[in-house]
Amino acid sequence: MKTILATFAKLCLTLAIGSAVWASAQKQEQYNVLFIISDDLTYTTLSCYGNTVCHTPNIDRLAETGTLFTKAYCQGTYCGPSRASFMTGYYPHAINAMGYKNPRPEIGNRATWSQHFKNNGYYTARVSKIFHMGVPGGIEEGGHGADDEASWTERFNSPGPEWKAPGTGETLEGNPDGIVPVKGGNTFVVVEADGDDMVHSDGKTAAKAAELIRQPRDKPFFIGVGFVRPHVPFVAPREYYEDFLPYDKMVLPEKRPGDWDDIPKPGINYKTSVNMKMDIRRQKKAVGGYYASVAFVDRQVGKVLDALEASGQADNTIVIFTSDHGYHLGEHDFWAKVSLLDESSGVPLIIRVPGQEPAVCHSLVELLDLYPTLSKLCGLPEQDRLQGKDISPMFENPEYSVRDAAFSVAPMRKGFLLRTHHWAYIQYEEDASGGIELFDTTKDPGQFTNLALNPQYKSIVDTFKARMAGKLRAVRDNYLN
């Protein structure tokens, strides 16, 4: 009997030790998440995406150790809709996120992306702009903007002087005579600012993020770090402008006479060289000011990555870098966001997953895919209601594909995009009554020639119309199920 009891005791001890080891292994595999997002950043300005003028060494080093996505698209081509979408897991018009309001009234008690992590034992923190926050006004005020309190364990804002920063400034937009002083609002303003990084919102954001990463805690973290540059005003300490002076050396994108003649009226962007009254000098200065803002953000990203490395947690932390949408810097004489062309709808996306080899992935992905993908990678419960797709297999196999078209909306223009590897199809109004654009992006990567009214492409247009109608139905049918 004693032998049997002794054997049983050994068995129980072995099972207990095995369970403890298994539990420990499971705990080790529950990664931290560091989500870094820059505001209004086009992928075309990053050196890891091929820019040879604007150097971004810190973002580049993340790309060198992670997976760089070359065909990532936002779901809304300005801040409010895009951020509401990837944070809730729904397309913008599915939850009526057409503007800048908090999406909570529409989604009810359903968990946002960070809230899902919070509900499953994570410490979740927001530093500055993750949900929508007005720039420059909201940053000057230092308030929460359209943030969602339930999504976070702690929230931290980073007030800054924005266009009021001491320095040398010029208003470029609507100022052909040079008499308009530096001013706030959604206006193209360049300020070569006095002082160091910590004068500005993004400098404070990097410092707070680094502090949170260094803090010891007994649970994994999800930290959202939101930088507001290069959103206008283009404000950065003077040192970041040095590589881009004099501004007249900046090279503008190709300009073609009659470029707008074959596109419908809603396809002409809300900010153009014409309605902004920006001559060539001002356009070149706008590019230089934007590049300086990007260089400033890159340095702040580096500070956050350095803190992660120094903390000893880099090998157990998934790092994501992206933007809420792209940005025009004079392509087609367009400026800013809102359009559905690649410069505005495409986004930089870099994800580093511990243990995965660096890669470049050309598969189509959406920002909407972040929520289900990170949940999967961190072992959190799946939610079938989410409208994004799990792209986690792409880190093992960059050729893996989950979709044959990316979908994006431009609520301000009532525009909708289906972007495949070969085609970009855009329609305005849900019935396409506002006009159509079709671009062969293989032969015409700059999207200069609209083929929609060419009879030779009627069958392709008809196919895309039917696909768009089906996509719009599916988005609504699946909403909140």
Image (cartoon, rainbow, N blue to C red):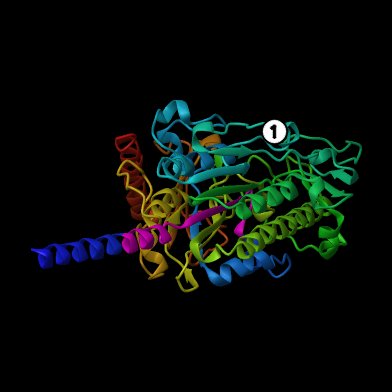
Residue extent of the magenta highlight: 20-43
Residue 274 coordinates in the image, percent (x, y):
73, 43
Residue 287 coordinates in the image, percent (x, y):
75, 55
Residue 154 coordinates in the image, percent (x, y):
58, 38
Q: Amino acid at mark 1?
A: Gly
- Is residue 54 visible in the rendered image? The answer is yes
Image position of 14 with respect to 166: above or below: below
Q: Is residue 54 magenta?
A: no
Locate residue 314: give its quadrant.
bottom right
Decide which of 264, 346 is in the foreground and name it.
346
| Figure disc tally | 1
**280 relative to 158 in the view: left or right:** right
Locate residue 399: give its quadrant.
bottom left
**125 relative to 251 in the view: left or right:** left
Q: Quadrant of the C terminus?
A: top left
The residue shown at (73%, 31%) is 141
The residue shown at (89%, 36%) is 181
- Is residue 453 visible in the rendered image? The answer is no
Decide which of 463, 9 is in the foreground and name it.
9
The residue shown at (45%, 70%) is 355
- Farthest residue to the front: give it: 2
Q: Is residue 33 magenta?
A: yes
**391 relative to 127 in the view: left or right:** left
Secondary element type, mark 1: helix
Residue 378 coordinates in the image, percent (x, y):
40, 55
Decide which of 344, 432 is in the foreground and name it.
344
Q: Which residue is mark 1?
A: 138
